[in-house]
Amino acid sequence: MRVRVKICGITRVQDALKAVQSGADAIGLVFYSASPRNVSLPVAADIAQALPPYVSKVGLFVNASKVEIERVLSAVHLDIIQFHGDESPQFCDQINMPYYKAIRVKDDTNLLQYAQLYQNAKALLLDTYSDTAMGGTGQVFNWDLIPAGLEKPVILAGGLT
């Protein structure tokens, strides 16, 4: 299995290019105003345009409306969406674009159930649950919670060591 790296929360073109130079396969752009890593549409468009074609451009949204997402998509060329909130499978599917669904993992999280619910997701992005943040905590969850029979691709996020 090949390890791929996505650097999320990029807010400057020079940082995106440095991440790519350092081996990043994907760049995450955060479109969530409560995040300190939130990026404006003009800057996000500049970052996306500056990236080489082999680097995936991921747009991260947290409980955004369909109108908000479509506004971003009309201004910024993204390859895939990362839904990082409480979005339903029906909501994710209606955007009509490939997506990852972030799951905030707790000890009682049933990943097989999430894989069934989000059948159209390209992958489940697994991040540690936090009461105080939607993601980006840097905390590691118990990877043994990932069932061997999970057929949906998995992306590990947050704390990795």
Image (cartoon, rainbow, N blue to C red):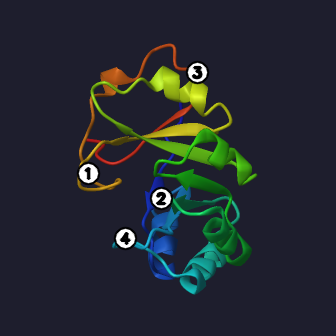
Q: Which residue is mark 1?
A: 138
Q: CA distance from mark 1 to mark 2?
A: 18 Å
Q: Residue 33 appears at what percent x and percent y?
A: 42, 73
Of callouts 1 and 4, which one flags the residue occurring earlier in the amino acid sequence?
4
Residue 151 is left or right of residue 3, and the answer is: right
Residue 152 in view in this figure: no
Of callouts 2 and 4, which one flags the residue occurring earlier in the amino acid sequence?
4
Q: Residues within 10 Å of mark 3 (few under 14, many from 20)?
A: few
Of callouts 1 and 3, which one flags the residue occurring earlier in the amino acid sequence?
1
Q: CA distance from mark 3 to mark 4?
A: 33 Å
Q: Which residue is mark 4?
A: 34
Of callouts 3 and 2, which one flags the residue occurring earlier in the amino acid sequence?
2
Q: Which residue is mark 2?
A: 62
Which amino acid type corresponds to the residue marked 2 in the rendered image?
Answer: Val
Which amino acid type corresponds to the residue marked 4 in the rendered image?
Answer: Ala
Q: CA distance from mark 1 to mark 3?
A: 26 Å
Residue 107 is left or right of residue 34, and the answer is: left
Q: Are marks 1 and 2 in contact (CB under 8 Å)?
A: no
Q: Are marks 2 and 4 in contact (CB under 8 Å)?
A: yes
Q: Looking at the image, which is closer to me, 49 or 146?
A: 146
Q: Residue at x 50, y 23 (%)?
A: 113
